[in-house]
């Protein structure tokens, strides 16, 4: 800075500078030309880009977790519906034929092993189809 005269005392100061201290790194800056402190890098384009990237990453992760939880909730509901329907059918069959497990056990024992495997696979596929339909198309 140029020489400055103090209006109260009349003393002339030949040169002066301002001292700035960084609040993060505690580094001291001397400003001899009056331009102010050095640039704060927290407002630089790189730091803004990093903040934006992590912000979007957090939003994406939140939506992904929300979607997984929603699908899990739908799967549990669909499975509960399948079990409820199965229990209703068991009650209906028991009402018609009496001892449902007794006649089914006798019927199952007469069937060949290959047919038992095929019927078991068919029932599992139907249950998975119902759960999948409720899960993805409701």
Image: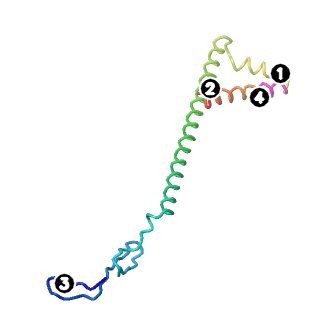
- Secondary structure of the residue carrying numbered label 1: loop
Depth check, front residue: 11 or 128: 11
Magenta stretch encompasses residue 85? no
Question: Which corner quadrant of the image does residue 64 belong to?
Answer: top right
Residue linked to disc 1: 111
Residue in view at x 19 percent, y 84 percent: 6
> Looking at the image, is mark 3 or mark 1 nearer the viewer?
3
Residue linked to disc 3: 6
C-beta proximity under 8 Å, tags 4 and 1:
no
In the rendering, at what x and y percent does residue 95 appear? 63, 12
Q: Is residue 128 above or below residue 7?
A: above
Question: Which corner quadrant of the image does residue 36 belong to?
Answer: bottom left
The answer to whether 32 appears left or right of 82 in the picture is left
Residue linked to disc 4: 121
Magenta stretch encompasses residue 117? yes
Q: Is residue 53 above or below residue 126?
A: below
In the rendering, at what x and y percent does residue 46 appear? 51, 63
Hey, which residue is sitting farthest top in the picture? 96
Residue linked to disc 2: 82
Depth check, front residue: 42 or 116: 42
For marks 4 and 1 on the same chain, the one whose residue lies earlier in the sequence: 1
In the rendering, at what x and y percent does residue 110 appear? 83, 20
> Looking at the image, is mark 4 or mark 3 nearer the viewer?
3
């Amino acid at each position: 800075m140029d020489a400055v005269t103090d209006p109260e005392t009349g003393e002339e100061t030949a040169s002066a500078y301002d001292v700035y201290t960084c609040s993060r790194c505690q580094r001291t800056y001397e400003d001899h030309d009056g331009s102010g402190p050095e640039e704060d890098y927290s407002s630089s384009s790189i730091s803004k880009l990093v903040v934006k990237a992590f912000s979007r990453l957090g939003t994406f992760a939140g939506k992904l977790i929300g979607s997984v939880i929603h699908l899990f909730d739908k799967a549990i509901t669909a499975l509960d519906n399948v079990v409820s329907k199965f229990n209703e059918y068991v009650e209906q069959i028991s009402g018609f034929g009496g001892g449902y497990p007794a006649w089914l056990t006798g019927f199952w024992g007469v069937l060949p092993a290959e047919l038992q495997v095929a019927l078991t696979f068919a029932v599992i596929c139907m249950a998975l189809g119902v759960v999948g339909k409720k899960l993805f198309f409701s």
